[in-house]
Image (cartoon, grey):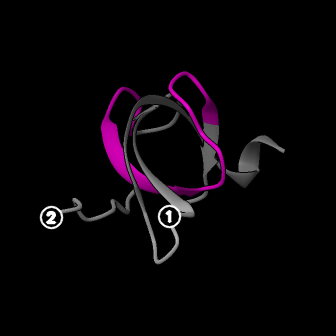
């Protein structure tokens, strides 16, 4: 199962986004692989909070910053 993605720890919950607020933008720290230690901005679906570990299928992509 380890080859199915890269674990990343949520270090900050930025903001809810999406047409109904169903997507949460988070900053997550990559925990394994060639990008270990880097912090990336990603969009996550569902309930998520600081300290959660999520599995990223692709660590090279990064979400755009939400601007209001």
User: Is residue 30 found left or right of 56 in the rendered image?
Assistant: left
Magenta span contains residue 44: yes
Q: Position of residue 42 (x, y in %)?
A: 41, 54
The residue lying furthest to the right in this view is: 1
Label 2 neighbourhood size at 10 Å, few (<14), some (14-19), many (20+)? Answer: few
Q: Position of residue 36 (x, y in %)?
A: 41, 30
Q: Position of residue 3 (x, y in %)?
A: 73, 49
Vertical position of residue 30 compared to residue 3: above or below: above
Residue at 61% from the left image edge and 28% from the top image edge: 52
C-alpha distance separating marks 2 and 1: 14 Å
Which residue is label 1 attached to?
Answer: 21
The residue lying furthest to the front in this view is: 20
Which residue is label 2 attached to?
Answer: 68
Badge 2 or badge 1: first in the primary sequence:
1
Quarter of the figure with the C terminus? bottom left
Numbered circles on residues, count: 2
The segment highlighted magenta reads 35-53
Quarter of the figure with the N terminus? top right
């Amino acid at each position: 199962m380890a080859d199915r993605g890269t674990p990343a720890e949520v270090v900050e919950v930025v903001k809810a986004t999406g047409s109904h607020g169903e997507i949460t933008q988070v900053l997550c720290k990559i925990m394994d692989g060639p990008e270990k230690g880097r912090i990336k901005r990603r969009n996550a679906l569902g309930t998520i909070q600081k300290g959660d570990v999520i599995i990223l299928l692709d660590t090279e992509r990064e979400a755009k910053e939400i601007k209001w």
